[in-house]
Image (tube, grey):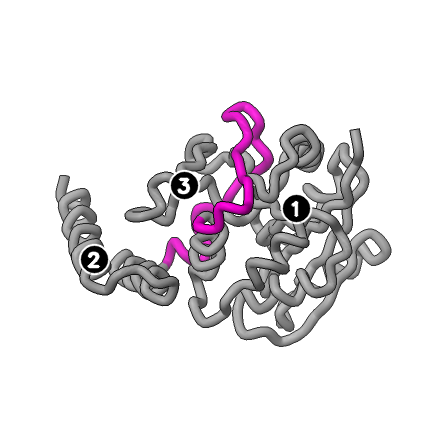
Amino acid sequence: MKNRKITIITPVKNDEKNIEKTIRSVLNQNYKNFEYIVVDGNSNDSTLEIIKKFRGKVRFFSKKDKNLWDAINFGITKSSGEIIGTLNSNDFFSKNALSIVNKYFEKFDIDYLFGAVKKNKVFYKFEPEKLHYRLNIYPSHSCSFFIKKKVQKKIGLYNIKYNFCSDYDLFYKLFKNKKFKGMNTKKNEVVGKFNMEGISSKVPFYKFYFYEMKIRYDNGQNLIYLFFLYLIKILNKIRNLFT
């Protein structure tokens, strides 16, 4: 089996408590053909000093960026791997994560992959058939998503104007393009642990839904349909809060 070179990108800013554990989860992989890029957003705590401890094992950059996606985009432009994955600070890979990833790209000749991840439970389902009315149809972005670099180039980089949900925009484009083949790992093939208290968890649900509608509109969905979809989502959320 060919061992493809995998690039992992970690964007981070002011996370001195967690960055070392995240880095070690990559460096301790039992799969060795990888490149690790850490993009620090000009941290003003000890994050950068911690990253420097791994000089020679990690390629790192410290620069001002506009947001998380801007940092990831920078990492993509610096990458040399055939496959690209993202691991946010305070998310962690399981020890055999990259071995699982390489196996799937080799065995199934896919363009992108979603690995099962542990949150409050294991999330592993990938349901692109629900794209017309849902965008959260995959386990997660950080620690779960891997894509061939040549496919990333065709789809494009993350659109930084969406701030906290640019992954939705990129995935919408990717899933709508039937040329590209993707799949998910099995439930027992967990590639990592995802922190559920990240940026998106702090966004009010109505604002998150609004951005989802904007992404859909920018990608050509009907405005009237989106108005009713937004209304239904809001009403369902309110009902769930009370029940």
Find disc 1 in the rendering and name its residue.
21
Tell me the quarter of the image containing the N terminus.
top right
In this rendering, would 59 be left or right of 195? right
Residue at 46% across / 48% down in the picture?
Answer: 175
Vertical order, 121 against 169 (above or below): above
Give the x, y percent position of residue 182: 54, 39
Q: Residues within 10 Å of mark 3 (few under 14, many from 20)?
A: some
Q: Amino acid at mark 1?
A: Lys
> Is 203 inside the magenta-drawn segment?
no
Q: Amino acid at mark 2?
A: Tyr
Give the x, y percent position of residue 91: 57, 46
Q: CA distance from mark 2 to mark 1?
A: 44 Å
Find disc 3 in the rendering and name its residue.
128
Find disc 2 in the rendering and name its residue.
225
Look at the numbered discs 3 and 1 and tell me whether their residues touch, using CB distance below 8 Å: no
Magenta stretch, residue numbers: 176-202
Which tag, 2 or 1, sits closer to the chain's start? 1
In this rendering, would 142 be left or right of 135? right
Give the x, y percent position of residue 37: 72, 57
